[in-house]
Image (cartoon, coloured by chain):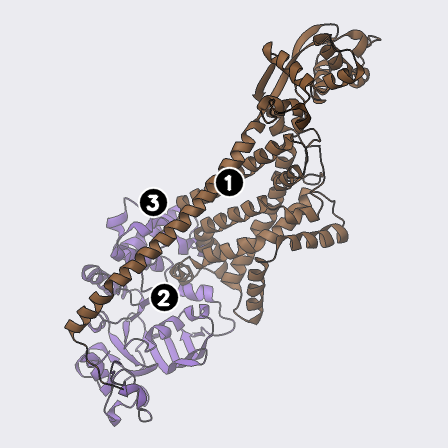
Amino acid sequence: MLNVTPNSVGSVAPPAGVVGVGFSPTADDSRVISGTVGDIKAADPRMTARNVDVYYGDKQAIKDVSLDIGKNEVIAMIGPSGCGKSTFLRCLNRMNDTIDGCRVEGRIMLDDQDIYDRKMDVVPLRAQVGMVFQKPNPFPKSIYDNVAYGPRIHGLTDNKQELDEIVEQSLIKAGLWDEVKDRLDSSGTGLSGGQQQRLCIARTIAVAPEVILMDEPCSALDPIATARVEELIDELREQYTIAIVTHSMQQAARVSQRTAYFHLGELVEVGKTDDIFTNPSHRLTEDYITGRFG
Amino acid sequence: MSKMHLDPQRTIERVNATLGRRYRKEQRFRRFGLGAVALGLLFVALMFLNIIGTGYSAFQQTRVLLDINYSEEMIDPEGTRDPAILSSANYAGVIKQALRDRFPGVTSRGDKRELYTLVSSGAALILRQQVMENPGLIGTRASVWVPADDDIDMLVKGHIDRAVPESERRVKDQMVAWVESLEVEGRVAKVFNTTFLTSGDSREPELAGIGGAVMGSLYTLIVTLLLSFPIGVATAVYLEEFAPRNRWTDLVEVNINNLAAVPSIVFGLLGLAVFINFFGLPRSAPLVGGMVLTLMTLPTIIIASRAALKAVPPSIREAALGVGASRMQTVFHHVLPLAMPGMLTGTIIGMAQALGESAPLLMIGMVAFIVDIPGGALDPSTVLPVQIFLWADSPERGFVEKTSAAIMVLLGFLILMNVLAVILRKRFERRW
């Protein structure tokens, strides 16, 4: 028989209030999460989330998260896998509605409308709050049709000329126009990964949303394509409000003005990106950004 | 627990020790698989050889050249050229006269009766058609190729052995002699059998054809396709894209999967009880046949369509929902077009099943002997597999080759449909 060392982490119950899966913090009061550290408010909030709880069936994925997303700023959400950052992001345009057994409690406001209100329709909401996904997911249609799809279904244009204009403008904003202007009729799936992701960004901004949610937009891209997309995010900040989930702390530091650190479904700390990375207040944040775990 | 240490030396020894056995096992398994494939191919080859070997001769028909005298006194004694009289004239008499003229030595009643069986009873119909189309033939003489009787057909094709004693074969020595004398004169020929492809069923093998059954199958399949494709796709789309996951949809799903395993004759009974007895739809009609086959094909189409929908990556749905498409737009603009090749493939496979199905159709009366070629989905008709069943059951020697030939036609259609399914799949296959 092989002798296997028993997993001590699983068999020893962590002290109450201390989160103890995957790493073994010393039973130290400084790692207890007791509410969010830092200022959850933004100067000019576009979206406000208050006391949001999300459940997948019986399992609670997000616990009591409150956070503002301010106008013309990029807010980065970081944290170890499974911490709920993507779940929180997907609450902001109700993409979680498509998941069976997912339940959202609390209040999320876009400007001054409650997006989880009974009267709220998800179609206009998603036109206002666009989303870019982790894996580039262009439609298997032409580049032109990819960008034109949103304006078409919402009837944003009156004629072909206006639509052409929107497609061109969106591709220019997404920094893709020069690369694809001669082959708008070729398939969107034939582009490289980085180009596909920028095409998805163009598709999102073609409907002129107020807020753009990005769920790890660069995780499937190489460093050069990542740099290109990060540059783009910085340019888009002037016109849009952007919330980005990322696994890369360097990326968060490069593109965001505010950073929110999530841990096991709770929002541990929010603050100006510079402060979080240079002078974190909470021990868990410090552990994460110094690479002690995650 | 005893303590045990693994070291690289021990590992490699152990691995080497078992290596030979592992490879032998793999070899055995591979040979077993090859053997199974070879056996399967052998059976398929035997089946095709047998069917084609028996059936190919049905595509030929023996014809006899007769010198016909379109005598006015026999066809239209009063000279009115009235179509009613021309239609009911005694053309069989004209044929008999031609045979008597050819073999003047035959005098006794019994011999004459035998002489008349040399040619098919369909020969008179050919003359009638000629005269109806061209009454000017009356009073003239012409040589006409008429179909031989099925026994003579078998004799000429070699299915009846001339060498065996007279008592052991259907065709008498005397008739063989007549046929041989005709053959010497070049008055017997085998031509391509258009009758087999165009005409309906008949009691006479030389006049029987699959035309009626093919048309019946066609109408039945059209009804099946028109009903099962929209219903099947709509069900699949609802269950896969819209329905909530709960006990009811689970129940529906289990039932659909079970329906796929229900013996097809049960669907026939259901069709008989509901469509014919309760709703009073006509018996033997392709409409009812199509409805019954729809019930049978639906599970296949639903299951294939759901698999096709499942294969569409969720990222496409998210992309569409993310720019604000409604669920309906997401499905119809993106998911359905991507799933369509898979759905079509499933539908064609289901149609091929339906084409080959006979049991449920027996229950709703499509097994009747129907001579007329159906002109629509409400006319009584039969279908190819049932026609095969009917002919296989017939005692005449001439129906043996007809049965095999009909199987060849059916297999031809099935292969065609499956090839179409494969082409569709290859042509529209998408990669992400």
Tell me the subunit letter for badge 2: A
Question: What residue did someone put label 3 on?
Answer: A185
The N terminus of chain A appears in which quarter of the rendering? bottom left
Res A202 seen here? no
**Which residue is tagged 1?**
B47
Q: Residue at x 41, y 76 (%)?
A: A108
Disc 2 to disc 3: CB gap under 8 Å: no
Describe residue A74's horizontal placement relative to residue A109 as left or right: left
Q: Position of residue B12 (x, y in %)?
A: 18, 69
B201 sits left or right of A76 in the view: right
Q: Residues within 10 Å of mark 2 (few under 14, many from 20)?
A: many
Q: Amino acid at mark 3?
A: Asp
Find numbered disc 2 in the image and state the secondary structure of the residue it sits on: loop
Q: Is residue B195 in view from this perspective?
A: yes
* Residue placed furthest toward the right: B78
Tag 2: amino acid? Glu
Q: Residue at x 71, y 36 (%)?
A: B370
Look at chain B in the picture and name its colour.
brown
